Image (tube, helix red, strand yellow):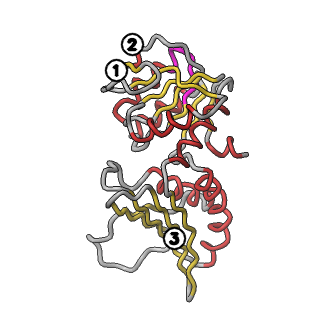
Amino acid sequence: MIRLIMNGCNGKMGQMISRMAAEDEEVVIAAGIDKWDDGHNSYPVFSDLENCDQEADCLVDFSTASGVDHMLEYCVKKGLPCVLCTTGLSEAQTAAVKEASAKVAILRSANMSLGINLLLKMLKEAAAKLAPAGFDIEIVEKHHRMKLDAPSGTALALADSINEELGGDYEYVYDRSGRREKRPVKEIGLSAVRGGTIVGCHDVIFAGEDEVITFSHTAYSRAVFAKGALQAAKFLTGKPAGMYDMGDVIG
């Protein structure tokens, strides 16, 4: 049985993972970490990682970017593998994640769903064929009104996957309102929509002469992310120090 610490246990994703873990015979939530708790969880909840006295095999983080530095320090100190799902990290925090991965296993993904991670691979092949043929690339993402970061971490991951395949030559553009000029060839436009209770929609558009190809992924429930997070925790437990992603999980 794999014992997990759920960092951000009382958030929407933390609660979804907790419910799915309760039905999974291979994992158990040993402890939760959150600033508040009303006692409804079946496991002990601590307000800070330093106060946690439960042994664990892996930590799953669905919290906020502001707490990532402290979480990384804790995982390194405890030798605890970490499934890092929190988005909106700064460049300095991204560097800190890489540094920590030299000492402990870290799996970082902007999106835990199987579909999105398969899409990341598919986009590389599409970009390699379509970009040289003159197709322009745009990404439109839609999320609920409560999401704090924009564009989404997933949208950036999709753009990075494409850009990596194209040699890193493309510039990301988030706003065109301040310029009046034709669209440069080597740019990827990223647009964010916020409203209602949209769980997550991502469209990657390849627009060419007289034809448009669109790759779309829609998440109808947070369950797809929770399932992926638990799969990632199972994969990461016992792994040596290093940086991993969901591509390693799905093979």
214 lies above or below 94: below
Marks 1/2: CA distance? Answer: 7 Å
Residue 137's tag is 3
Going from N to C along the chain, the mark reached first, 3 or 1, is 1
Q: Which region is colored magenta? A: 75-82
Give the residue at mark 2.
51
Q: Are marks 1 and 2 in contact (CB under 8 Å)?
A: yes
Work out whether 243 lies above or below 174: above
- Disc 3 and disc 2 in contact, CB within 8 angstroms: no
Q: Calculate the distance from the C-alpha at mark 3 to the C-alpha at mark 2.
A: 47 Å
Nearer the observer, 24 or 139 = 24
Q: Which residue is tagged 1? A: 47
Indicate whether 44 appears above or below 225. Answer: above
Residue at x-position 34% and y-position 79% = 181
The nearer-to-camera label among 3 and 1 is 1
Quadrant where the C terminus sits is top right
Image position, residue 77 (x, y; %): 50, 14
**Is the C-beta separation of discs 3 and 1 under 8 Å?**
no
